Image: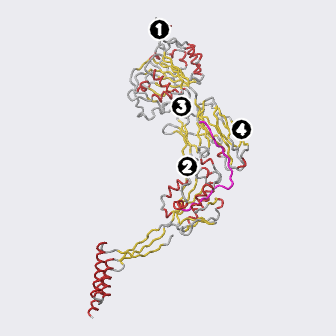
Amino acid sequence: MNESFSTLQLELSPLLDGAHLMLALTLTAFGLALLGTLTRKAFVFRLGALAALILTILNISTLSTTERKTESIALVVLDQSYSNTINDRSVQSDAALELISQNLADLPDVKYRIITAPENNAKFQETNLFAAIDKEIAEIPPKQRAGVIIISDGNIHDIPEDLNASEISEKYGPIHHIITGHKNERDRRIEIIKAPLYGLKGTNAEIEFVVHDTEASANGQNISVTAKLPNGETLEMRARIGEKQTINVPIEHAAANPVELFAAPAQNELTIANNRRAVIIQGIRDKLNVLLVSGAPHEGGRYWRSLLNSDPAIELVHFTILRDIDSLDNTPRNEMALIPFPHQQLFHEQLDSFDLIIFDRYRNQGILQDKTYRNIVRYVREGGAILVASGPEYVSDRSIYHTPLGQILIGAPDNDVMETNFVPHRTADGQLHPITRNIDQNQYEGEKWANWLRQIRVKANPNDKILMDGLDGAPLILIGDEEKGRIIHLTSDQIWLWARGYKQGGPYIDLMRKMIHWLLKEPSLEEGQIELSLAGEYITVTRYINSDDAPLLYTDPEGTEKPLKLSKTAKRTYTAQVPADKNGLYSFYSGNNRAYIINGAYDTQEQTFMISNAQSMEKIVQQSGGKQVFADDMSGLKISAMNPEYVRNYHSFSNIGLRQSQFTETLNVNYAPLFPAWAYLLAFVGIICFAWYRESK
């Protein structure tokens, strides 16, 4: 430990304040001058008596202190970024940390703190070590800062550039850099120059990339690059190192389309982690063609039209039947403003061009013949979609359920129109299904939506899924599959009340859009949807419905396929965690459901340059008076504490130095009068008596 030392000094603590002290001294001087003028007998003794009096007034005291220098505090910073964990760098870091800790433990005048950075959730992004250093060093008094020892590969991205040598030395002390990795390392990587975020289904997306190699002599060489396409096929191509290359990728799905590129590794390459790059292109449809047929004008019809027209991805064709085919009307046809319903053109010639057909309160009016309904059945079974929004006409003798369309419709009419207030509610299935799981978007308290005024009672089959119910639990929204196609039946024509804001309204837009996009097979609304989230070093997998018939599998960035067991939670979801211990694309699939996530954002600073880098820290280390040492050369290295008054560079051939503390702490303070008051009084009286004695002679 630091040895203590003592100091002694005299201090004045006058018994009088400043003004009175000056007055007393002035009177004393005047008295001495007067005595010296009137008589010279015993003048010296009178002067001594007055001096004793003045000393008594000045109250001279001694202040003795015992102090010692405090311990200095050093920071040891361990880089735990992704690049500092590849190959044997973790082993080098641990060995360097152990050697440094042993040396520091032998220094009695130096304490040390070990900090790690960056945080796990940023380890693939960038290495910000000085942010962690600044946060920790702010708690240490400047005179106690011994210095900083950084164990890192040198790929540090927040090195201060705006400080001069004196500022660096004052703020940090000497900075020493223990360099992990090895000299003359070689690395090859792929850089994605351009890749679209979206691509139209059925078209090709263009991806531009460059292969880089740290070996200068490799530029211009041809190497093999393997591309894994969204359809699972692989494409082998040749790429010239250092030159831009282009690949066209077919967008086959209106969903996530992952593309992986892998450059053949070089001989003795540092790591192949950055030889692989992946991008995810979101496939989108060009236009969705929707046919809306309204059986009669009603309040909800215009809300259907407004909703569909508000979606830029939807091309709407809307017809409203205003006049039955057998209506009695003597108006000549050539004088009618109405046009005949083009059923032949719509339901035969152009039917397959529509992605969705909506029957809004449509009744069998004799316009569509049985062959037309049978063609609609064929259209649905071959992959089309139909939505039926029914009213009282559904339970009449003109119900479309009594046509050949009834073969595929879900919800048989029960001959009951319920004209009663009711509030729609989600069923148990509806609370889990993507259509209705989050439709309120936290805008409403629970399910306290506005009530509807009418519902049609229907009978559901066991295979039909009911997402919402109404009065007395009667099915309100039913969904089902018909071979390759899909069907939704809404058993009320009152949803427009929500759209109009009746009472407090309800989640009209969200619900209707999700129903339409589910019918159009939007991947994010699939029932077996796989949700992925990345936090720290784990990927969390969540499913709301888990089928034992379609087990969940996943593929890691190296192409290894593994099964995944999900556990049911209290919220009726199924979840699991997968260690994200590899950098790249993770693919999850179950049946027709697919989900993808990239661990580590590609082309970040952390993953761009991964070879050991001594140059990045060279300037700041030199300015601080520190030293750079490769971890491989640390054998025999010693650490010592140095006095900053006598050194400028804190290192020698086999030694790195830390700054001794310039901060002292007081152990003891003793304050006492130089002489006791009675001694001054005795001296004053004695001298006066002796002066009288001399004068009497």
Q: Give the alpha-carbon distance from disc 2 to disc 4, as whole Å.
A: 36 Å
* Closer to viewer: mark 2 or mark 4: 4
* Closer to viewer: mark 1 or mark 3: 1
Badge 1: how crowded within 10 Å, few (<14), some, or many (20+)? few
Q: In the rendered structure, which disc, 3 or 2, sits on the residue that comes first in sequence?
A: 2
Identify the residue under disc 2. 120
In the picture, the disc for residue 237 is 4
Farthest front residue?
37
Identify the residue under disc 3. 525
Horizontally, residue 69 falls left or right of residue 261, namely left
Q: Position of residue 661 (x, y in %)?
A: 51, 66
Q: Is residue 366 above or below residue 258?
A: above
User: Which amino acid, mark 4?
Assistant: Met
User: Magenta stretch?
Assistant: 173-196
Secondary structure, mark 2, is helix
Q: In the rendered structure, which disc, 4 or 1, sits on the residue that comes first in sequence?
A: 4
Q: Give the alpha-carbon distance from disc 4 to disc 1, as whole Å.
A: 69 Å
Q: In the rendered structure, which disc, 2 or 4, sits on the residue that comes first in sequence?
A: 2
Residue 298, picture quadrant: top left
